[in-house]
Each structure stands twice: as C-alpha cells, then as structure tokens.
Amino acid sequence: MVKHIILWQLKDGLSNEEKESVKAGIKSGLEGLKGKIDGLIDIKVETNPLASSNADVMLDSSFESEAALKAYSTNPEHVKVADSKVRPYTKTRSCMDYEA
C-alpha cells in the first residue's frame, strides 16, 4: 500500500468565511472521489488544524500501489477537483508519498 499525504496553506486575503467555504469544498470534492478511482483505497481530508499548525488542509489517502497513485494524479475526476476546488485557493503544497 502507498500513502499520499498533502498539506496545503490557503492563499492570503481570504476572509474566515471564504476559508471555511474553500475548506469544505476541498473536503467534499476530494472525499467524493472514493469509489470512483481504481486503486484508491481510502481518502480523508482534515480541515480543522490546531492553532500550532502551519497548514490549513491535509489530504490523507491510500492507494493499492505506486502505479495506482500515478494514475490518480492524471485521472480526469481528480484533475477536475484539483483544478476547481484546490489549486485556485492554495498558495503552498507539500507532499509526502511512502510505502506503508
């Protein structure tokens, strides 16, 4: 199994209401991919970090293999969510993939 962890910081200038709306959209969009992409075992999005955090949103996902993760990255369903709900609102992205 391969784990795919992403941490994002939201763009500066968003109001608290906008941030909450963006985080909800990211969560529903990415978690909505479960069952739609071959090789995707599990996908969860955390949007309520503690004050000590320096990230606003975390993606925690599991894949059957590295090949399944690679296929996910270009899957049209994933790209649609990334392009509409994630990329327009995030300023930084950190990623760690590893075998579990």
Image (cartoon, rainbow, N blue to C red):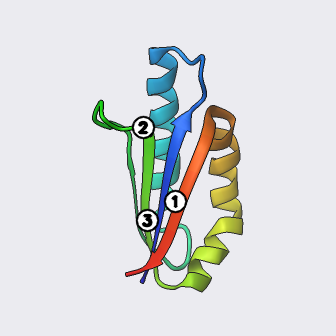
Residue 61 — which label?
Answer: 3
Secondary structure at badge 1 equals loop
- Split into 4 quadrants, where in the image is the N terminus? bottom left
Indicate which disc, 3 or 1, sits on the residue closer to the N terminus. Answer: 1
Query: Label 2 amino acid?
Result: Asn
As drawn, 47 above or below 100? above
**Residue position for label 1:** 33
Residue 75 — which label?
Answer: none
Q: Residues within 10 Å of mark 2 (few under 14, many from 20)?
A: few
Q: Nearer the viewer, mark 3 or mark 2?
A: 2
The residue located at (42%, 37%) in the rendering is 54
Secondary structure at badge 3 equals strand
How many numbered marks have been drawn onto this rendered protein structure? 3
Q: Residues within 10 Å of mark 1 (few under 14, many from 20)?
A: some
**Residue position for label 2:** 54
Q: Nearer the viewer, mark 1 or mark 2?
A: 2
The residue located at (67%, 42%) in the rendering is 87
Secondary structure at badge 2 equals loop
